[in-house]
Image (cartoon, rainbow, N blue to C red):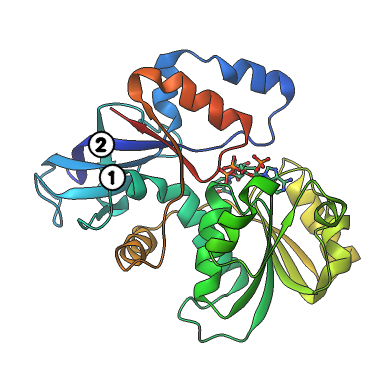
């Protein structure tokens, strides 16, 4: 407890963690016990009420963004307890709603681009072509903006209604995933890397369009992902399918919040819901058609 921070929650986010659930699972998850929903959110922004005796960097009254435990969650509530290591200062330029959008989705986009692919976000790396699928979603919309900070040419996929939005985030070309070009990820370019933010697109769709040492970074790896990963290593020794799971780091969260302060990153807000109507937020999230992030406010 001594390294923990008690804060009010001004804004929390429901994050999509069940993208590969079966229809049966989705049906069950559509109407979960409201009490259990508090567990589902890890992403919060609020104000510090009190700190443990070993907390060094925060005091009561500080505005913060925090990521809670991926196992216990706890964000869909009026108060939360966060670890100091995954809590960062929130400058006044960053609203609670925008800040709360960042943790899981922003950190996953950041990890995929910087660690899995090696993009340098100061723009100093070699020019590279990237495909980002589901660029209108929580992870995808941050991935487009971050990729454009690097030296990248971004092709993105999303539904027709979000094409202009995704272009406004910086994508160089945007393809409607429901069209024939979109279904094959519309290739006139060879991609060095794919940040794959949705489900149901097989490796065989990406493989012909990947450059010789291209990588597909899969942020929604199914249970069989490790098998596919090793099989691919044998069949396509140069091209890679790389499943990733978020390893959250406070320094990266701080970096993303600072980018937002500088106006280089924004959170697209799909909708805001009151905590008393949290089931609506949940239902929207489970449907998989959010544009950006779904916010819950007390
Ligand atoms: N690896 C990790 O650590 C990690 C971290 C965070 C999230 N995730 C996973 O990542 C996945 C994405 O999460 P998210 O929150 O970013 O998604 P999301 O916000 O639910 O994405 C919804 C958006 O994706 C679009 N979309 C759906 N299918 C598409 C397709 N085939 N092609 C292009 N666009 C499509 C939708 O457009 P329309 O409405 O027009 O259909 C909608 O705008 C989830 O499965 C989540 O569990 C993994």
Q: Position of residue 152 (x, y in %)?
A: 61, 77
Q: Is residue 141 above or below residue 282?
A: below
Residue 280 image offset from top left, x and y in percent: 48, 22
Q: Is residue 204 left or right of residue 250?
A: right
268 lies left or right of 151: left
Q: Residue at x 60, y 56 (%)?
A: 164
Q: Secondary structure at mark 2?
A: strand
Q: Nearer the viewer, residue 26 or 264?
A: 264
Q: Quadrant of residue 273?
A: top left
- Tell whether 239 sits left or right of 7: right
Q: Earlier in the sequence, mark 1 or mark 2?
A: 2
* Residue 111 in view in this figure: no
Q: Position of residue 77 (x, y in %)?
A: 31, 26
x, y percent for residue 193: 70, 69
* Residue wearing tag 1: 96
Q: Quadrant of residue 276?
A: top left
The crowding category of the residue bearing disc 2, from other C-alpha atoms within 10 Å (few below 14, some 14 to 19, many at least 20), is many
Dot 1 falls on a residue whose secondary structure is helix
Q: Is residue 66 above or below residue 12?
A: below
Identity of the residue drawn at 48% across and 75% down: 121
Q: CA distance from mark 1 to mark 2?
A: 6 Å
Q: Quadrant of ligand 1?
A: top right
Q: How many marks?
A: 2
Disc 2 C-beta below 8 A from ligand 1: no
Q: Which residue is mark 2?
A: 10
Q: Is residue 82 visible?
A: yes
Q: Is residue 132 above or below residue 62?
A: below
Q: Is residue 168 left or right of residue 229?
A: left
Mark 2 and mark 1 in contact (Cβ < 8 Å)? yes
């Amino acid at each position: 407890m001594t390294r923990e921070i008690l804060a009010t929650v001004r804004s929390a986010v429901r994050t999509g963690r069940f993208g590969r659930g079966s229809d049966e699972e989705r049906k069950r998850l559509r109407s979960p016990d409201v009490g259990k929903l508090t567990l589902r959110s890890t992403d919060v922004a609020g104000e510090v009420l009190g700190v443990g005796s070993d907390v060094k960097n925060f005091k009561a009254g500080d505005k913060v963004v925090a990521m809670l435990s991926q196992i216990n969650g706890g964000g869909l509530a009026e108060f939360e307890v966060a670890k100091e290591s995954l809590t960062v200062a929130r400058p006044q330029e960053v609203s609670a709603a925008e800040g709360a959008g960042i943790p899981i989705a922003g950190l996953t986009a950041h990890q995929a681009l910087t660690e899995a692919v090696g993009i340098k976000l100061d723009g100093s790396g070699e020019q590279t072509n990237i495909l980002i699928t589901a660029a209108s979603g929580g992870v995808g919309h941050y991935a487009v903006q971050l990729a454009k900070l690097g030296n990248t040419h971004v092709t993105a996929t999303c539904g027709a209604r979000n094409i202009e939005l995704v272009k406004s985030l910086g994508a160089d070309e945007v393809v409607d995933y429901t069209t024939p070009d979109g279904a094959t990820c519309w290739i006139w370019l060879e991609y060095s890397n794919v940040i794959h933010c949705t489900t149901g697109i097989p490796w065989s769709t990406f493989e012909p369009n990947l450059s010789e040492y291209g990588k597909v970074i899969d942020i929604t790896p199914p249970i069989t992902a490790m098998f596919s990963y090793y099989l691919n290593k044998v069949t396509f020794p140069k091209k890679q399918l790389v499943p990733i799971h978020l390893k959250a780091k406070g320094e990266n969260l701080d970096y993303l919040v600072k980018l937002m302060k500088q106006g280089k990153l924004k959170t697209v807000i799909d909708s805001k819901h009151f905590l008393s109507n949290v089931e609506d937020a949940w239902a929207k999230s489970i449907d998989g058609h959010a544009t950006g992030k779904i916010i819950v406010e007390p």
